Image (cartoon, coloured by chain):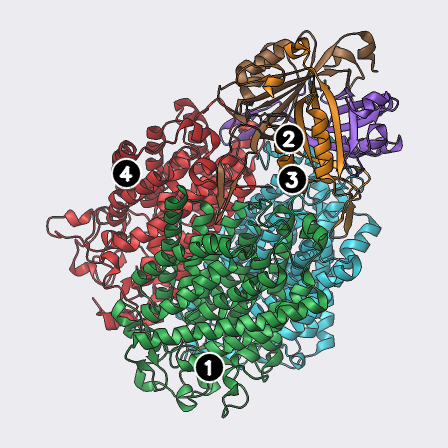
Chain colours: A purple, B brown, C orange, D red, E green, F cyan
Amino acid sequence: MGPAGTQGIGMKFIIAIIKPFKLDEVREALGAIGIAGMTVSEVKGFGRQKGQTEIYRGAEYSTNMLPKVKIEIAASDDLAPQVVETIQQVASTEAIGDGKIFVLDLASATRIRTGETGDTAL
Amino acid sequence: MGPAGTQGIGMKFIIAIIKPFKLDEVREALGAIGIAGMTVSEVKGFGRQKGQTEIYRGAEYSTNMLPKVKIEIAASDDLAPQVVETIQQVASTEAIGDGKIFVLDLASATRIRTGETGDTAL
Amino acid sequence: MGPAGTQGIGMKFIIAIIKPFKLDEVREALGAIGIAGMTVSEVKGFGRQKGQTEIYRGAEYSTNMLPKVKIEIAASDDLAPQVVETIQQVASTEAIGDGKIFVLDLASATRIRTGETGDTAL
Amino acid sequence: MFRKILCGAGALGTSLFATAAAAADLVKAPDIAAQATMVNKGDTAWMLVSSVLVLMMSVPALALFYGGLVRTKNMLSVLMQVFMIVCIAALVWVGWGYSLAFTSGAGLEVGGHQFIGGISKMWLKGVTAGTYAATFSNNVYLPEFVFVIFQMTFACITPALIVGAFAERVKFWPLMLFMVLWLTAVYFPIAHMVWYWAGPDFLVDAPKDAGYLWDMGALDFAGGTVVHINAGIAGLVGCLMIGKRVGFGKEATPPHSMVMTMIGAALLWVGWFGFNAGSNLEANGVTAVAFINTFVATAAAALSWSLVEQSHHGKPSMLGAVTGAVAGLVAITPASGFASPMTSIAMGLIVSPLCYLFVSTVKNKLKYDDTLDVFGVHCIGGIFGAIATGVVAAPALGGQGIFDYYVFPAGVVEYDMAGQVWKQVKAVLVTLLWSGIGSAILFYIVDKIFGLRPTEEAEREGLDLSEHGERAYNY
Amino acid sequence: MFRKILCGAGALGTSLFATAAAAADLVKAPDIAAQATMVNKGDTAWMLVSSVLVLMMSVPALALFYGGLVRTKNMLSVLMQVFMIVCIAALVWVGWGYSLAFTSGAGLEVGGHQFIGGISKMWLKGVTAGTYAATFSNNVYLPEFVFVIFQMTFACITPALIVGAFAERVKFWPLMLFMVLWLTAVYFPIAHMVWYWAGPDFLVDAPKDAGYLWDMGALDFAGGTVVHINAGIAGLVGCLMIGKRVGFGKEATPPHSMVMTMIGAALLWVGWFGFNAGSNLEANGVTAVAFINTFVATAAAALSWSLVEQSHHGKPSMLGAVTGAVAGLVAITPASGFASPMTSIAMGLIVSPLCYLFVSTVKNKLKYDDTLDVFGVHCIGGIFGAIATGVVAAPALGGQGIFDYYVFPAGVVEYDMAGQVWKQVKAVLVTLLWSGIGSAILFYIVDKIFGLRPTEEAEREGLDLSEHGERAYNY
Amino acid sequence: MFRKILCGAGALGTSLFATAAAAADLVKAPDIAAQATMVNKGDTAWMLVSSVLVLMMSVPALALFYGGLVRTKNMLSVLMQVFMIVCIAALVWVGWGYSLAFTSGAGLEVGGHQFIGGISKMWLKGVTAGTYAATFSNNVYLPEFVFVIFQMTFACITPALIVGAFAERVKFWPLMLFMVLWLTAVYFPIAHMVWYWAGPDFLVDAPKDAGYLWDMGALDFAGGTVVHINAGIAGLVGCLMIGKRVGFGKEATPPHSMVMTMIGAALLWVGWFGFNAGSNLEANGVTAVAFINTFVATAAAALSWSLVEQSHHGKPSMLGAVTGAVAGLVAITPASGFASPMTSIAMGLIVSPLCYLFVSTVKNKLKYDDTLDVFGVHCIGGIFGAIATGVVAAPALGGQGIFDYYVFPAGVVEYDMAGQVWKQVKAVLVTLLWSGIGSAILFYIVDKIFGLRPTEEAEREGLDLSEHGERAYNY
Ligand SMILES: Nc1ncnc2c1ncn2[C@@H]1O[C@H](COP(=O)(O)OP(=O)(O)O)[C@@H](O)[C@H]1O
Ligand SMILES: Nc1ncnc2c1ncn2[C@@H]1O[C@H](COP(=O)(O)OP(=O)(O)O)[C@@H](O)[C@H]1O
Ligand SMILES: Nc1ncnc2c1ncn2[C@@H]1O[C@H](COP(=O)(O)OP(=O)(O)O)[C@@H](O)[C@H]1O
């Protein structure tokens, strides 16, 4: 629908779930390949990785919910594979629970300040 | 763009907004149909459901923003409808504000630990 | 996959990153064009905007991570451009860091309470 | 607040010598003008400070200790309940509580007065800046208002202790009403039975002018029976009658802020010195005994709970340590002015495993939903402490022994440990029965008339919003 | 810190008998060596503890009470303002404050001294471990440093109260400068007018050696005029002159942490016993009167605010309860050593609806942005309390009455309620005018020269980052 | 807790006159029955309150001050370490600490006793409600338990100070073991050396019955050497031997809750009056001197740190202000009973820039990871304070001077500033060496046998979960 779509400049929306302490490293590495912006949030992850058992007085809470960080990055089709690869390499500790990278197609992007659209908006 | 796309194994990215106290039940039900992982975050929802009026000294704050939980699940095309159905059934209290389930197409998925892609990465 | 897809009524999933203090205004403006619901979360943004330098005893922390608010809105194809435009106009302060609006295609939407799908679920 | 205490030669000497030249000069049944000369400003200062400390135990300490352990959505309800109970109890205390607890009852001859006091001082009638209250030493007095205040802080915290047992699932105003009734029908009578007596300069001429359990010879220095067993059993009854929380046993309910719980526990410890050492009513050597016992029993109990957890779960938790500390404080309370530091340590070491057993195993087995372990910590710890008091008070174990106030001036008596323990057991049983049955009746009445339980929806949403219309945090 | 108090036979007796054998032995105008023998360590202990408690009222109590009510982004600015005001006020106090407030001014004959003291004790010149300060009893003294300290804590908290009125929108250093000026030109004069006098052993020979309002006979036991009305009106002037917050009335500004507010309120209550009961300067029966009045007035006001909210909104909020408690504390402050417990309860019950009216209806009508209701609670509550003091002090109502210090030894006088109320009203008006006008001038000057208001951008970002470069929480 | 103090005519007079008619009546070496008559309840009340305040400094104050500065995932570990150290130290204190610190050592003739006391009072043998401890005034006594308690609170907080230096990276139980050893081998000997002496009524007949540094004439009113230098240097050694945190210098580690840090700092200030003014052991004019000095030095240091930050970074931070306050408290500690308010202000103004230099520049240069600046604030501030004490005690500067206890009754002596400063320097060096070397040996031993450092994974996950199995917050 958006102008980006009509312009035919493809973009991807990349969602990566990583271990929290890897965030700084990932950010630096992405900066190095020219990613200027991203949006980060704290999430809880549920997967194969087992969480710590927590005990409060008598009661044990063994939760599989573990703190993770979610990174969202809009990138042009050209840059996207490199972004995925960089995250995968930097965020990996080769231990279970390192997380996932999901890639979705992005129909359009707009910079609020200027109203620019397409990949110049990123 | 990713190998998943080229492999032709379709995947969906499912976003569900539910009432917080339903989370445990939903997780269990999804586990039962074979969903091994998901990512959860706390959000605030705005919709038809009316929030409580809060009063601080003289001032009343009546907000429609209500605490909700967002679940994100990547699933293969096969499993996706079942996921949607399960969530819909378990999370429903038949009261206003139960939430929504959105499904998007997923272009690719990568497991950070191993670099695997496609639905084996899930 | 979902019935919405089959029904052929297109929908978009709009993700906007804005400055926190603009949230109330944006919500009102969207209400005015008929957006009944949305989901909001607190995120941290990384971009061109420079953050404040924080100093704790000797150590300086100059982070580019700034508090932002993420709004997620599912809307029918018809309404989506208007949503994007409204957000862009209302959230803009013409200062760096105003944020972005991303639009993705939405394959299906379900209302948990009723099980309705398609744009009537929104 | 205790009976027949042996002040020890030195301590007794202290207080006597500070006000009078020698025991020979002691005045029997001094009149009010004489009493005015028997007040020491050091005692007054100490007792006022102690009162401040005990108030701090309720707000903010107990409120935070409890509040940190509930879920975010119920935080304010706990803070509000504790805060408002303190307010209401203070008003009830000056209204009729002080009179019912600390005046001689009608019917002295038939003995009914031994269960409840009279109404002569309702609304503090007759209490002025120039009336005095007795201490545990002959010819040592306090301004009566000081005693009224100190005891008021006890009447404020005891009902507040109860709410932990059914936190997260009770309606506010009915609970407040219950507390007014409970104070009147349960707390004041028990306080009268345990702590009321005519005072050391007067008892000898009116030997029956004392509460039932005091007269029987039961020891309770600072409130093992009156405060902890009393509140603990009321809590158990309440949690059974109100029922389990929605989702109990299914949903995880981890404490929302262990930091608040730690602040609360630390301030409870700090304030408890007013509670225990203040209960000596004077600032002398025995006060210091009560103080150090309170200190080391707590330390020992915190350590001991951590060791139990280490051996049971492989990790000592902070919640465990502070729970142990509170258990130690509860246990030492009735014994604080009687024990020695070494027997206090022993009590601390023992009470934690005991309470741990109740809090983890017994509670899980019996499946009652005592949200914040009021029964497991306060009632069990209180029972242990009350009975152990009979042992550790023994001079043979370094204890302070007991004092005979039926002679003038008061003097030391032989210590009969078995006899004393038996008196302690009887006092425990009387308290359990009176409070257990009384509380059950009152919960029943209030529930029938006003309903104690919020709707399931209100409970799910959290009491902060549904009962108070606010939210604890808006970060 | 009050005038002409009737200590009551017993209380007076207490202090006299503790230091001297009989009233006949009382020494008029004792020299310093004699004063040294008239010090009681119980009083010293009590007054030092009271000072500790009042400091705790500022930090952390007031800081948290206020801080919890602002938005997260301004939390540290509030904590910092309160903390630094306390520090600066302490330095100003030992610099020139004590001298300006508590020495006899120059020009005794022309009366100018009645508005401000002299400079003879600047930098605490001449104050040593061996100089003494008078109390309200003949021949009872305190080490002078104890009095300096106690009064210092009052000079620290009063300016800190003001900042709540314009929280979230003021620049740090200009505010600090304002406070130095305000203490000097507003607080010290008013403290001198209300609380300065030659003392009970000296007044009789120098009957004009007293502050203007003291001399007029206005009663202010612990600071209704000097502290609360004074700070409250300064706050109102400040919030009007600094202007409304950006987004006021449009953006929701719910308190970011009600838990901090509750901790603050509870510790304010706890500390306020030092403030009120400490203001008796001795540890005796009247001290206990001030203490219990402070306790029950607060309890009644908290309950009463909750009842108003229940009837108005259908729910009692925790913020309401603690706001009521603070209103009760404010109201009882000037009356604490004069009222009886029952009239204190009445004052508590009345003050809450009154403040509620201002905080909700009046403020919303007039649309001034008194962020934390400094005017609505402290000024209104203070005015009510100051005037009501004239009523509740009446012995006919159980009050302590007033004492004539113009004879030696001091003795009781007839009580004229109408006359006393009128004196109270005059004292309120003088305070409102002096502080209102003085504050306006000082705000104007500081604003013109340095600017009090941060830029809109800085305000939006929050003062924590823009003024202090830090963030309250990094969870 | 200090030596040879000039109480000042008035202050001395106070205590003497309160208990005896005139100096002529003073009793040399009074027996226990005589001592019983020399106890003042005002002193007892004050010292018990001071003990409560010092306990509050550890829990919750220090725990929160430190805890707020670490990352969320390590919050509970800090709270737990501080809480449990207090518990264990209390038990060790009554076990053997009091005896090793405050009894005369064996071998009085050969001088070995000057470094460590004896074992005669292990498990508090012989200490009862009727034994007494000396103060700094002739013929003024405290119940011995009061002194045991007060000193216990010092033994509790000192080891707790250390943990800040290696917060976020230490194993719990090995740390607890280290603390037991450190108290025994480092703290008790230094306390004995600095604070042990026979008392003013006995020293004259046993002039060698005093600790090594006391005997040398080093002044330490409330613990500059014993507490702050001692803990500060142990912290530095610990942080060097345990090593830097994983990610040190790379990952940002902003404090997780400045609010907790502020609450902690404020309560430290509040409690420190018990620490410093309590160290006078009586409630008199000198107590008030120590109190006001503690107040204004802190205020000056907080202001001064803010000014340094303003000029260096353009913004005064709240963390800076409270860090300055703590630095001021540390600096004034050894001098509190000796300085005047004006020299205390000077000390406060100077100590902040000094500590600031260490905390920012020096630490960053030398790259040691002293997580919470235990060395930079406590050791550096302590050294400055200890040495400056030799200056500010001079009567010429308004100081209290020193007192000669080798005569009876004790009297004033000439003040030799250069000589005194040199004694102070020697005391600092002895403390640095004893504690530095002793700590290094103990850390080494514990590390070899049990390991002090958690695994990298445990550290990354956070000590709350890995060491204690809980989470601080579950909002
Ligand atoms: N199907 C999924 N959909 C969305 N998020 C997932 C999914 N599976 C895993 N995740 C996220 O990835 C994180 C890591 O997954 P996990 O199975 O523990 O380890 P690994 O990625 O090493 O296989 C989870 O904590 C969760 O946040
Ligand atoms: N158009 C939308 N886009 C994104 N999220 C929505 C939208 N509409 C509703 N939501 C989310 O779903 C939640 C529930 O919606 P609401 O309208 O209150 O009730 P219901 O789902 O029962 O119709 C909202 O709180 C919000 O989080
Ligand atoms: N490529 C991107 N992908 C996802 N989010 C982005 C991206 N670039 C910017 N953002 C988000 O938008 C916010 C504003 O971006 P910024 O570059 O600071 O200013 P502007 O939007 O004015 O260009 C960022 O804080 C971040 O949350």
**Quadrant for the N terminus of chain A in the image:** top right
Distance CA(mark 3)–CA(mark 4): 57 Å
Q: Residue at 34% across / 84% down in the picture?
A: E409
Residue bearing the label numbered 2: C33
Other-residue count near label 2 (Cα within 10 Å), few / some / many at <14 / 14–19 / ≥20: few
- Please provide percent x and percent y for residue D360: 46, 28
* Amino acid found under the numbered disc labelled 3: Glu
Residues behind callouts 4 and 1 on a single chain = no
Mark 1 and mark 3 on one chain: no
Q: Are marks 3 and 2 in contact (CB under 8 Å)?
A: no
Task: Classify mark 1 as within 8 Å of ligand 3 or not, answering yes or no.
Answer: no
Q: Residue D279 at what x, y percent from top left?
A: 36, 55
Question: Which residue is under mark 3?
Answer: C25
Q: What amino acid does circle 4 point to?
A: Ser
Q: Nearer the viewer, mark 3 or mark 4?
A: 3
Residue E310 location, x and y as percent? 38, 44
Q: CA distance from mark 3 to mark 2?
A: 13 Å
Secondary structure category for the residue under label 4: helix
